[in-house]
Image (cartoon, rainbow, N blue to C red):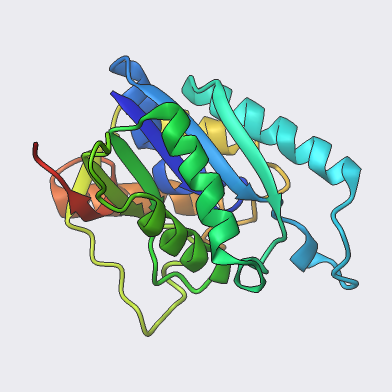
Amino acid sequence: MKILVVAAHPDDEIIGVGGTIARHVSKGDEVTCVILGEGNTSRNNTYTSVQQTYLEMSHNETHCACKELGVSNIHRHEFSDNRFDSLSLLDIVKVVEGHIDRIGPEVVYTHFGGDINIDHAVTFRAVMTATRPLPGSTIKSVYAFETLSSTEWNFTSCFRPNYFVNITDYLTKKLNSMKHYQSELREFPHPRSLEAISLNAKVWGAKSGFHAAEPFMLVRSFEN
């Protein structure tokens, strides 16, 4: 199968779906990761353009993290961090559509639309538009993933997963992949820490009958 992961920021693809990506790769599926945002400027006091040194470091982190999972098809874009809502939605949709047209994926993973991070919410909306069920579409299913430090912090919109992937054999690979994102990792008990990511996978595993799992919301499914 051909799999497309559309994430807003570097590291979202690992936190949300890293174990599932590794599982797909192990089964011989072709995985492509698309990251839409540069992921840094909102952290600067001046909120200016992202520095080239950061971009080079971040691109290297993404390359190494995805390589750890066995993914070589990686595409980075540079939409401004936490300002997706200031852009034309169509511009983002066109980028996602371009990758869909080029790849012809059967399965698409992206953010939960109720995340507190505005870029995640806009990414979800763009993917929903780009994956609309038109004649000739290759897409069979679309899933929304959880992103720690965003999904659980929106206390008015609840992530209710109805699809669980057993990543017991891939949790170590997910954590090793996340280690490459040194610029994004935080110390426990921050949810974007290795310990929190591991514990979260084990809790979802306990809820779904596995030692470790990643949760998803099935958004759309098509049977031809």
Residue 19 x/y as whole percent: 38, 35
Residue at 90% from the left image edge and 72% from the top image edge: 46
Residue at 80% from the left image edge and 42% from the top image edge: 55
Quadrant where the C terminus sits is top left
Seen as rendered, the residue at the extreme bottom is 156
Between 28 and 61, the one nearer to me in the picture: 28
Seen as rendered, the residue at the extreme front is 135
Between 37 and 127, the one nearer to me in the picture: 127
Q: How many marks?
A: 0
Between 79 and 177, the one nearer to me in the picture: 79
Horizontal arrangement in the rendering, residue 100 relative to residue 62 (left or right): left
Residue 216 x/y as whole percent: 27, 52
Residue at 51% from the left image edge and 39% from the top image edge: 98
Between 159 and 198, the one nearer to me in the picture: 159
Quadrant where the N terminus sits is top left
Residue 95 x/y as whole percent: 56, 46
Horizontal arrangement in the rendering, residue 39 relative to residue 129 (left or right): right
Horizontal arrangement in the rendering, residue 90 relative to residue 206 (left or right): right
**Vertical side of 34 occupied by 40: above or below:** below
Classify residue 112 by image quadrant.
Answer: bottom left
Classify residue 151 by image quadrant.
Answer: bottom left
Residue at 65% from the left image edge and 67% from the top image edge: 87
Q: Is residue 170 visible?
A: no
Q: Is residue 69 visible?
A: yes
Seen as rendered, the residue at the extreme left is 224
